[in-house]
Image (spheres, helix red, strand yellow):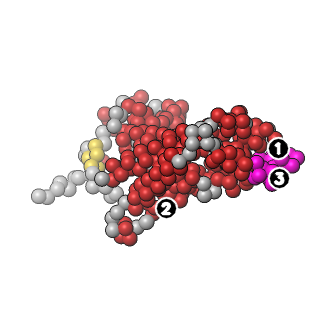
Amino acid sequence: MMRSSSFSPLSTSTRHTAASPIAFRVAPLDRIPEDALESKPDCKQNSLIRQSLPVLPAVFLLLHPTAASALPISLESFQSGFSQAFSLIFLSEIGDKTFFIAALLAAQTSKFVSFAGSLLALSVMTLISVVLGQLFHAVPPGITNGLPLDDYAAIAAFAFFGFKTLKDSYELDAADNSGIEGELDDAKDAVASSQTVKETTRWAQIVSTFFLVFAAEFGDRSFLATIALSAAQEPVSVAAGAIAGHAIATIIAVLTGSQIAKYISEKVIGYIGGSLFLVFAITTAFGIF
């Protein structure tokens, strides 16, 4: 079919662009109101629209009922990892060597110095543990033949710590706190051999406390437990829960001092901690199978 020779892009209501085959309508000039041609864009209104654009995704998440499910970390998984890490680390730190180091330094320097240096060291150690736990996720599936190596390692670690802690607690007498007393003696030796108390400035004392607690925490049970938790749970939730557990335990140590050792039952804490390890091993296994 032949087109009319009088065809002109300006005389029709459709125009095709070279960049896109989609046609759009252009109203004839005689149909556009004169006030529309003479009006100028509202700069303030355009600026307000541009400023509100970054807020639209947040508004969408609030208004859309299923938008939260698309987030990288769900609220349920965050709560699970946070609660497990918090409870396990808190119980592991009560009566631990680093617990008593913080208590002793609070009495010999200041509560602020002891809390700041201890929590900073424990937080850094927690992040290292979480990273080490996440290395299990980096193992190529071809090497493990599709097996969840990270979950298997977490189950093995939880089961080992659980049975060992329960066994040690069962063999203790009700009034036997030799384990906690040994941790207290080790903490006294560590503080006495350090330069923390001898430092003249507060910043130097915080730095010295950091290295003292960091060295005492490395390779500890809570350090290994955080690695196992990170291999089985969301790393962000594990890090947040573990740091929160360290913070609460350190606050108790700083405020109460080493005298709290008289009121801590090593047998009871061992039973609770060992049971938690086994519960986490079972729940992780159910998540696989």
- The residue lying at 88 percent from left, 47 percent from top is 200
Residue highlighted by disc 3: 195
- Give the residue type that dot 1 points to: Arg
The stretch in magenta equals 187-207
Q: Is residue 199 magenta?
A: yes
Residue 180 located left or right of residue 105: left
User: Residue 147: which quarter of the image?
Assistant: bottom left
Task: Answer with mark 3 or mark 2, whichever residue precedes in sequence.
Answer: 2
| Residue 58: quadrant of the picture | top left
Instruction: Say which residue appears at 26% left-offset and 47% top-offset.
Output: 14
Q: Residue at x 57, y 39 (%)?
A: 174
Relative height, residue 57 to residue 207 (above, below): above
Distance between the Cα atoms at labels 1 and 3? Answer: 13 Å
* Residue 173 image point, x, y percent: 57, 42
When asked about the image quadrant of residue 243, the answer is top right
Q: Is residue 245 visible?
A: no
**C-alpha span from label 2 to label 1:** 37 Å
Return the mark for residue 202.
1
Direction from residue 3 to residue 142 in the image, left or right? right
Q: How many marks?
A: 3
Element at badge 1? helix
Residue type at tag 2: Leu
Question: Of 10 and 5, which appears nearest the observer?
Answer: 10
